[in-house]
Amino acid sequence: MAVLPIHYPKEILTALDILAVEMWGPPGPPRGAAAGRIQSYVCAVVRNALAFLASGGAEVVDGVLFPHTCDSLQGLATQATDLGGWGKAAFVFQHPRGGERASARRFALEELRSLARELEAWTGRSLSPELLAAAIRLHDEIDGCRASLLDGRARLPIGDPELYALLRRGEWLWPEEHLAELRSAVGRLGPEPAQTGLPLLVTGYVPEPMSLLATLNDAGAFVAADDYAAVGRRVVRRNGVADADPWADLISRYLAHPPCPTRGTDLAVRMRHLVSLAEASGALGVLVHVQKFCEPELFDVPAILAAFTARGLPVLVLEGELERSLSGQAETRVEAFVELLRARGRAA
Amino acid sequence: MLRRIQYELSGHLVGPALLRAKEWRRRRSRRGRAPKAGPFGPPLESTRKLKELMSLHYLQGRFADGAVPVAWVTSGFPVELLRPLGFFTLYPENHAAMCGVARTVPELSDAAEKVGYSRDLCSYARTDLGCVATGKTPAGRLPKPDLLACCTNICQTVLYWYKALAQRFGVPLVVIDTPFVYGEAKPHHVAYVREQLEELVSVAERVSGRRVDPQELVEVTARAKEGSRLWGECLATARSRPAPWTGFDGFFHMAPIVALRGSEACNAYYRLLLGELKDRVARGIGGIREERHRLLWDNLPMWFAVRELSTLLAEEGFNFVCTSYTNAWAEAGVRVDPADPYGSIARAYTHIILNQDLTNRLGILRRLARDYACDGAVLHSDRSCKPYSIGQVDLKERLGEELGIRVLLLEADHNDPRAWAAEPGANRIAAFMESFA
Ligand code: SF4
Ligand code: SF4
């Protein structure tokens, strides 16, 4: 099943033996004329997705799941299914926004159950509590490994391109296969720092183009703390306390996600989280890497600027449009930013 | 106490007197001057009352904070639940539109952009955040909020925008999150919205220090329903040929149903307007002098260019007789039922045009075009309103094919003139009009 960004109950898909293949665009130029059916002032993720779906790029999958992440994805969900572009099975997942409330908890549960029922009917499989509990355990373990890799980033002797290629394989691999390679990466975490570059906090949407990471490394910096929507913001850190009822447990897992603007997190809560990430990683600067026209991310930028400027941490805001490679101009900005951090370090 | 006196006086005594004096001066200065000949029919008399009503609202707002609880509210918020608690409600979208008409948006947006807001964000939000940052407003002064009330039935943008306001003002933010509707809302979606309404009331009661009187809620709900009905009737008069007013007039006259919904002042105004429109229909008076073509408008207006656009069109005999935007305010309220305020408000506010799928939207456009006998349509592709604009490329094709009408997709922005290329835009409209020859 193809899945659009960002948050969705992967545990249910896993429990029903459905392979999730995430579609972050796909990146690069639109693969089909249907991109023109959405105005150029809408983000590349949505335009590329419609082009890809309508041109038959996703024919290999049997269905698509559209999480209602933002206005644009919500629009895509109805445009592709009501006005043409996707004729096979389509599902939506709507998550509650506006903070943790009793109503939100109940709604999330109803919505998850409703999606599960639809998927059961579609696959002809039955979702037993045991299967769901096992899937939750699997994803807890996956997230545990991912958290170890991200939190112990400085002690991992590999470059960012390699680390992110590994983390992002989780977007399309079977979870068990992904877990196996994550475990082996965790085994490579050393006792001492292995990264010598300047530590950065990166917050943003998706690390595309991936060449950005190589540019950062080449310039002498590395991602010490990650708050990408596609990566760190989907890593749930739980203390192994599972609810006996798998549905209640699923909700707890859902609510334990790090703050994310697409879920309506309070700004102060999100800023506290970002500051704690920066402090824990010793980040010397902040890279805000957002998609052009992405309202959920862009609205938080002033608060991020204010929070880190107040702490004396320089911030670079970089907007992308899912380009295949980083533009020369963006590359220069990244290099200049790292140079600035280095100069500050020397002066200090 | 002093604040309360100022507030009451501005609303009931000094304000009306000032406005009457202003109007008297305006008339005196015009005495003897012949009305300008132009492509429009005689101006609506009610417009004076509209100006008075809205000016008074904003004038009173200057003294509201400290006198009564103040809520800043999104246009699609179920305000019926705040009225019995005595809130003065300010609609940042309505206020931003005022700034759009006053052409102060570039300056305000610049102020927002200076602190990091991208120019790609909704121009209403940028306008408002710019007002908050600079304190500049054509209304003189805006009251500070005690409560921020946001409903996601128009877009999710308002959630991000109001979160920023909540951080700025340090006051509670209540969110009514309305799940998107495919076909009809699912029962658990309506139940979720209903439950949030109850959560909202407990926060709003705490902020206002009052309790919702159930009887008062019934009355407010009944008034809101009646207001929507009256507004719908006003719009429906444009089914006559010639239409007694223009769709662009409608953009301005919708202010009370947006900002004063649920109040008697709102309903009294629409009774007055309806009377005048019916009278014009009976006497064959049109919104434009020579109505040759009838158009449908989709999406928000371009507030900064309403006059120019309507003149350009009216000069060639084109009138916008209906718009999906103004129509939305007539449709939503009909579902409200005073016998079941919470349940019906939950259903009504979930089934807002922007919170429903594109099949529904196409149906509405189709119906409007037929009911109002339109021979063309302009879909305003609004750069900063993604929820309203996504899908329009396809809607254009469908409307043209199914109804055999000419359809223009016009790229602009509802509030930021910098996103509107005036000359090429006017040329596109001219070419569109020529295609009717
Ligand atoms: S990039 Fe932003 S606007 Fe685009 S689909 Fe993702 S969340 Fe939505
Ligand atoms: S103009 Fe559009 S994006 Fe902006 S507040 Fe209104 S509905 Fe939302």
Image (tube, rainbow, N blue to C red):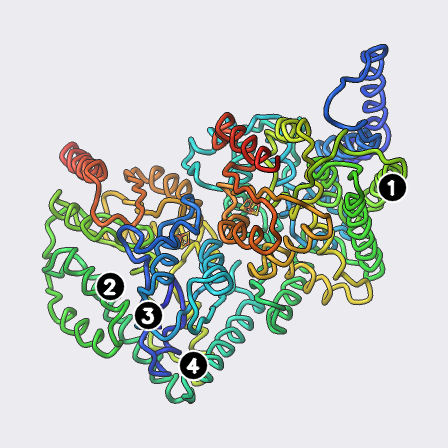
Q: Read off the residue under disc 1.
A: B278
Secondary element under disc 1, as helix, strand or loop, is: helix
x%, y% of residue B21? 84, 19
Sequence-wise, the earlier of marks 4 and 3 is: 3
Residue at image position (64%, 67%) is: B195
- Alpha carbon of mark 4 to alpha carbon of mark 2: how far? 28 Å
Instruction: Evaluate whether residue A273 shows in this view.
Output: no
x%, y% of residue A30? 31, 52
- Alpha carbon of mark 4 to alpha carbon of mark 1: how far? 65 Å
Name which residue type carries label 4.
Asp
Q: Read off the residue under disc 4.
A: A243
Q: Read off the residue under disc 2.
A: A168
Q: Are discs 4 and 3 less than 8 Å apart at CB?
A: no
- Alpha carbon of mark 4 to alpha carbon of mark 3: how far? 38 Å
Of all chains, the one bearing label 4 is A
Q: Read off the residue under disc 3.
A: A59
Name which residue type carries label 3.
Glu
